Image (cartoon, helix red, strand yellow):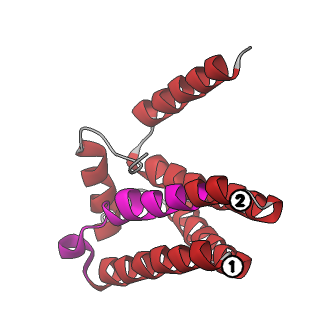
Amino acid sequence: MSRNALNTYSQIGLETSIGNANPHKLIMMLFDGAILALSHAKVHMQQGNVAAKGASISKAIAIIDDGLGVSLDEEAGGELAGNLRALYEYMSNRLLMANLKNDAEGVDEVARLLGELKSAWEGIGRQPHLNTPIAKESEAVAARPSMSYGKA
């Protein structure tokens, strides 16, 4: 199969997964996507591929800002949502500096933070449906017509 055909197939699979996912799963997919982008950034950094490293870090930043950050509802989520917003801003700034300085430790730090948040989110998913601001926030995310992973 050609690379174009594989990319098209992957995109269709992703769109199908997004369309069928519940709000909790959508957030999990965002965490997975950001972590994967950072993993790719590390490989490109080690190979000295500056353009691909920058693209991967930019993708992770877009997922954090335009996916995870946009899904926050500070009115419903209160202090927790505000703390998460501050953490997402920190991660985006840390990745920007890591990109500029070719700093693998910065990429690792953000990947670790995302992994910890993902683990906490997984724990929430194993609990019975909760009537909390986070659950309500997830329902609001699902009600949106589409979600952007950021600028290409």
Q: Position of residue 118 (x, y in %)?
A: 57, 65
Dominant secondary-structure state across the stretch colored magenta: helix
Which residue is drawn at the image coordinates 74% and 14% (left, top)?
Answer: 1
Is residue 77 rendered magenta in the image?
yes
Give the distance between the C-alpha atoms of the residues marked 1 and 2, in whole angstroms.
Answer: 13 Å
Residue 130 drawn above or below residue 6: below
Visible in this render: residue 36? no
Choose mark 1 or mark 2, whichever is in front. 1
Magenta-tinted stretch? 56-78
- Badge 2 element: helix
Seen in the image, is 9 located left or right of residue 20?
A: right
128 and 82: which is toward the camera = 82
Query: Which class describes the residues within 10 Å of circle 1: few (<14), some (14-19), or many (20+)?
Result: some
Seen in the image, is 113 located left or right of residue 146?
A: right
Query: Which class describes the residues within 10 Å of circle 2: few (<14), some (14-19), or many (20+)?
Result: some
Residue 81 drawn above or below residue 122: below
Residue 103 bears which disc, if any? 1
Seen in the image, is 108 located left or right of residue 110?
A: right
Q: Which residue is mark 2?
A: 39
Q: Amino acid at mark 1?
A: Asp
